[in-house]
Amino acid sequence: MTNPFKLLGISDDVVNAVKDLGFENPTPIQEQAIPVLLEGNNDFVGLAQTGTGKTAAFGLPLLELIDFKSNKPQALILCPTRELCLQITSDIKNFSKNISGANVVAVYGGANIMQQLREIRNGVQIVVATPGRMLDIIGRKAIDFTNVKYVVLDEADEMLNMGFQEDINDILSTTPDDKKTWLFSATMPPEVRRIAKNYMDSPTELTMGTKNTGNVNIEHEYYVVRARDKYAALKRIVDFNPEIFAVVFCKTKMDTQDVAEHLIKDGYNADALHGDLSQQQRDKVMQRFRDRHMQLLIATDVAARGIDVNNVTHVINYSLPDEIESYTHRSGRTGRAGKTGISICIINSKEIGKIRQIERIIGKQFTKAELPTGFDVCEKQLFSLVHKVHNVEVNDNQIDQYIPRIMDEFAELSKEDVIKRFASLEFNRFLEYYKNAPDLNASADDRGERGERGERGERGPRRSSDGYTRLFINLGSVDDFTRGDLLSFVCNNGKIAGKNVGKIDLKGVYSFFEVEDASVDALFNNFKDIQFNNRGVRIEKSGDPAESRSGGGGRARSYSGGGGDRRSSGGGRREGGRREGGNGGGGFRDFSGRSREDRGGRSSGGNGGDRRRRS
Ligand code: AMP
């Protein structure tokens, strides 16, 4: 039988390479996109989620269209993050392993530029790049794009979210006018539409699934809990799914670290991934997650961009994202490569409206799920253990020598007694922990409940209120700041307490925040000669009425419920007392002995991509 990739028009060398990767049949996007792209004379827009086989959908046709006898760059692939850049490069190297003379280079920030320049000088046909570093290399006149025939913009929506629009313009202006542009995006906001309109000539459009629709393999669930019970709810969900392998999303770096630390302390195999970690630390965390030495990866949206780990069983939204579109990206971390996955939101009753908004945008309904009772969890864990005992691989060579002594020890017990005792070893621990476990599902009476305080933290009024002064600061989301980051930056440098800071209105290159009138002088006195990324940081009293007006109705703000919930609502709380040891579920190692220093201090390196910072 002819190989299905060959039927699509892929040559033997490449077909053999993908066969070696275990690709037997093309994914739907490959089936549809490959024949169109192979024609090589069309611009192209593909609306596709991550994990659908997108890289091969454009990578395989590229390999057919490139002249590998020439050593000049003929294809440029731009993508938002370092992780994705490395992933695409590795995939294309694998696809092209049988093509002699094929050279692919990865160009991304945070790595030695000299090595990248050397590889470019030696001759490459395919450049995979993040925009900032690419522009740097173009600025050094170290690359010649006059022979580029194809430009791929991968995860275009993410690149725009991350503020790369101008960089992309600048890069594309160095490529020939008659090149073909292939754009892939998980969502199609107006800005991406605009790119398609500005840079493309009657592109062929392919939509995998409905527009803005999440992956069909993903089920969406939400749990309603009191805000103060969020952490306990997270643990219960994890305990009820002993084989869970999940990414847990938090809104701020502080929450991410906080939740991860509590989970580690409580014996779970978890770690944090956020922009305060150095690149090396992030690589280490990711490697452990990829190798499945870790069960729960707690991450911010930015840090988790481009994560390509297969077999993630659950995505847990510990806090809902500010931008609804981020939900699609978050949930796309599961249900990859044809697998199924569950995307869970842990919300309080005031956030149900946001769930409805997400439903409208992704075109899928959420199921309202009930948190299992303590008894349900115990039962689930017990049978998971029984199943594991049944399936465990027995190493006869090693264990045989101990069997006589073990039999001796159990001589007086019946088979049933022995089984009971083994099962109880694990079961007792869960029973003990869950014996008085409360019902965590919030009732209708909890609407507007005091948990709202825990959700937002305790730092003052939500409105631009009396007794507060509104201040301008020349830092914002392009500096990788979340509201929580801005709050700590202002408090640390201005030496004022978090509770004296009111509403935070995070913008792109600047932001506004409120400070209690009584603390304003102290803030200005302390906030002197402050630098961020070699740039002077400025705060001023905001007197711009236009800005004050616009501060009230921003989409992100109204969605986020007003910013900066810096405190983990679950932080420090335990459900029914502290557990000893691990979570009993997956037999994963307990890393709780790991020191905090391991994860280290702040790096200005930021988000895993090479976002350029502008002021
Ligand atoms: P991507 O969307 O390109 O990130 O691909 C997601 C995952 O699916 C990657 O791990 C690929 O290796 C895998 N994959 C891509 N195409 C196929 C295929 N035709 N058959 C099996 N796995 C695939």
Image: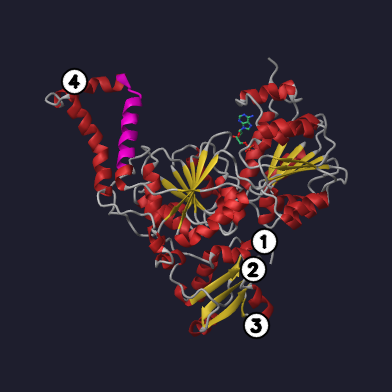
For ligand 1, tell me if the residue under mark 4 lies within 8 Å: no
For ligand 1, tell me if the residue under mark 1 lies within 8 Å: no
Tag in front: 3 or 2: 3
Tag in front: 1 or 2: 1
Q: Which residue is more in the foreground, 301 or 205?
A: 205
Ranked by sequence position, the earlier of labels 1 and 3 is 3
Secondary structure at badge 2 equals strand
**Residue 72: image location, x then y, percent:** 81, 37
Mark 1 and mark 2: span between their CA atoms? 10 Å
Kind of residue at badge 1: Arg
Decide: few, some or many residues near mark 4? Use Cα within 10 Å; few <14, some 14-19, many ≥20.
few
Ranked by sequence position, the earlier of labels 1 and 2 is 2
Residue beneath the point at 39% across and 63% down: 446
Secondary structure at badge 4 equals helix
**Residue 299: image location, x then y, percent:** 51, 51
Quickly name the residue at label 2.
Answer: 535
Is residue 49 found left or right of 319 in the rendered image? right
Is residue 537 found left or right of 451 in the rendered image? right
Q: Which mark is residue 404?
A: 4
Q: Which mark is residue 613?
A: 1
Ranked by sequence position, the earlier of labels 3 and 2 is 2
Q: Which mark is residue 543?
A: 3
Secondary structure at badge 3 equals loop
Kind of residue at badge 3: Gly
Mark 1 and mark 4: span between their CA atoms? 68 Å
The colour scheme of the drawn protein is secondary structure
**Residue 285: image location, x then y, percent:** 49, 46
Ranked by sequence position, the earlier of labels 4 and 2 is 4
Tag in front: 4 or 2: 4
In the image, which residues are magenta? 378-396
